[in-house]
Amino acid sequence: MHSALDLLLQKADSRHSARHKLFDVVGIGVSTVDLIMVVDELPGAELVQRAHSSLLQGGGPVATALVAVARLGGRSAMIDKLGDDWRGKLILEEFESEGVATDYIAWVKGRSSSVASVLVRKGDAARTIIYSPGDAGELTAAELPEEAIANSRILHLNGRHLQASLAAARTAKLHGVLVSFDGGAHRYGDGLRELIGLTDVCIVARQFAFAFSGEEELAASATGLLNCGPQIVVITAGAEGSWVFDREGRRFHHPAFRLERTIDTTGAGDAYHGAFLFGITNGYSLEKCVRFASAVAALSTLQLGGRSALPSCAEALCFVKERAHTGEDPQAVL
């Protein structure tokens, strides 16, 4: 029996040859500058403490997923709107150094770009994130580069620039482009239901799935998401791994890879998304996509920052192979 992923790829590639696509993944989201600090305690009251280490690095869920795609060897491009301040310039320079195409990023003179402060607790890598949006404004549907969307295999969204994302998803459908959605924890809003209905691959945090469905059980939550429109639903839960459901009735759980030491989980979910999409564009089976994404997410936690430890494709595949040889890659079927 074909998986929903097989059927999606057949449909997309039968209309437009993948060889003629300019990009594997194009994303729409908000790019940030992250100031990340490792501390002993997360603030709950007034507190002064010295950071063990710190890092200034680009961030944002879609943006980091696209960097992961590029690091793995895929072709990716970002669609966003930035201010022309130092933060915007840093964001742009990092994209370019990673090989993420920036041709479709709009600049707004005299405006600021987004910044986030991320505190990482040294003992267990738990985080507190404080986010300050820039004032460059929302992308509009009229500003979308339709040619970039049409010339990609996958359009990746997380609901930021919502009206533009809705228009982009409709454009993607017209051109046989798969649509991917990232639903992060504590980011659910009723306005996202229409976007999820235009999605082919929906990967969401467990908290997002429960908020969307009103259920507190994985299978029921996944059914609610599948009934909305996606062909594939993945529900992630950090160290507990991920659960996969598709419209053909396939369902399984892949535990997270265990590491002796985790430095920072910032961006691990974004790395998972990027690796999963890379797997799709390289013809991986659904099971291999999940295993590969889990490996990339695990490896991304070995250094401070969401992008510092993103692996190459060869490194990720080697990691998976080593774990399989040691019996540390179990896969439980629901």
Image (cartoon, rainbow, N blue to C red):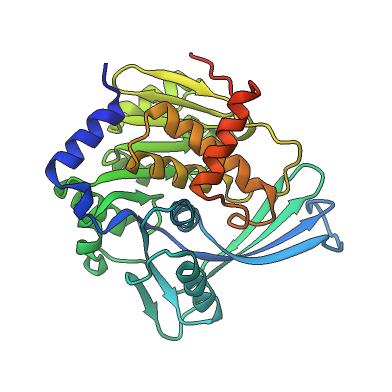
Residue closer to the observer: 225 or 271? 271
Q: Is residue 185 visible?
A: no
**Up/down of 83 relative to 218, above or below:** below
**Count of all numbered marks drawn on residues in the image:** 0
Residue sitting at the far top: 334
Residue sitting at the far bottom: 110
Instruction: Name the spot of residue 61 as percent of width and height, x first.
Output: 49, 53
Instruction: Name the spot of residue 92 as percent of width and height, x first.
Output: 47, 73
| Residue drawn at 59 percent across, 37 percent down | 319
Instruction: Name the spot of residue 127 as percent of width and height, x first.
Output: 69, 49
Q: Is residue 329 visible?
A: yes
| Residue drawn at 79 percent across, 54 percent down | 43
Task: Examine the image and state in which quarter residue 248 appears.
Answer: top left
**Up/down of 49 relative to 235, above or below:** below
**Up/down of 154 relative to 208, above or below:** below
Residue closer to the observer: 62 or 68? 68
Q: Quadrant for the N terminus, please.
A: top left
Instruction: Name the spot of residue 45 as percent of width and height, x first.
Output: 82, 54
| Residue drawn at 29 percent across, 42 percent down | 194
**Up/down of 196 relative to 69, above or below:** above
Q: Is residue 47 left or right of residue 92?
A: right
Residue closer to the observer: 169 or 73? 73
Residue closer to the observer: 300 or 164? 300
